[in-house]
Amino acid sequence: VQLQASGGGLVQAGGSLKLSCAASVRAFTNNMAWFRQAPGKEREFVAAIRWSGWSGTSTYYADSVKGRFTISRDAAKNALYLQMNSLKPEDTAVYFCAAVLLTRSTNNPTDYDYWGQGTQVTVSS
């Protein structure tokens, strides 16, 4: 499975960016997430999305981004998105998309088997 993240860039505080992640296998878009890693810090959970025929779509967010970020998926395009609004300088990091075939935890990076290469998001004050 290959994941390709894109959409990062430089934006002023209060601005918006939309990240995209293209997956090579559609089944993996059912259990995906975004993580981020700032210099000198550990990789941290940002948001996750789960879809099943039984329960539909569920989304999960870190407290630090709740109300500002929105995770979504487009199964027809094998794609994952992260709409980021009201960006803050502390959101500056490399953002990674991740996927797993059989869901485990939502926010533990060790429970995801496949990772994209990361895309840099820089928010200036």
Image (cartoon, rainbow, N blue to C red):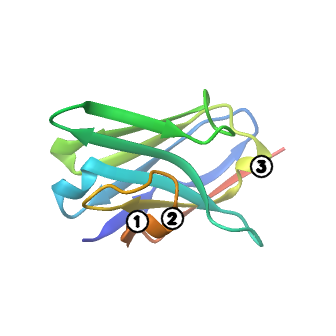
Seen in the picture, residue 81 relative to 85 is either above or below; the reply is below
Hey, what amino acid is under mark 3? Glu
Q: Position of residue 100 (x, y in %)?
A: 32, 62
**Tag in front: 3 or 1:** 1
Q: Position of residue 42 (x, y in %)?
A: 68, 68
Q: Secondary structure at mark 2?
A: helix
The residue to which callout 3 is attached is: 90
Hey, what amino acid is under mark 2? Pro
Q: Secondary structure at mark 3?
A: helix
Query: Do the CB atoms of the residues marked 3 and 1 lie less than 8 Å apart?
Result: no
Q: Quadrant of residue 41?
A: bottom right
Q: Position of residue 83 (x, y in %)?
A: 50, 37
Query: Do the CB atoms of the residues marked 2 and 1 lie less than 8 Å apart?
Result: yes
Q: Quadrant of residue 71?
A: top left
Seen in the picture, residue 122 relative to 84 is either above or below; the reply is below
Residue lying at the far top in this picture: please name it: 67
- Mark 3 or mark 1: which comes first in sequence? 3
Q: Quadrant of residue 25?
A: bottom left
Residue at the image point whose x is 17% and y is 55% from the top? 26
The residue to which callout 2 is attached is: 109
Seen in the picture, residue 51 relative to 118 is either above or below; the reply is above
Q: Quadrant of the N terminus?
A: bottom left
Give the CA distance from mark 2 to mark 3.
20 Å
Give the CA distance from mark 3 to mark 1.
24 Å
- Mark 2 or mark 3: which comes first in sequence? 3
Hey, what amino acid is under mark 1? Tyr
- Given residues 17 and 28, the one toward you in this image is 28
The residue to which callout 1 is attached is: 112
Seen in the picture, residue 77 relative to 24 is either above or below; the reply is above
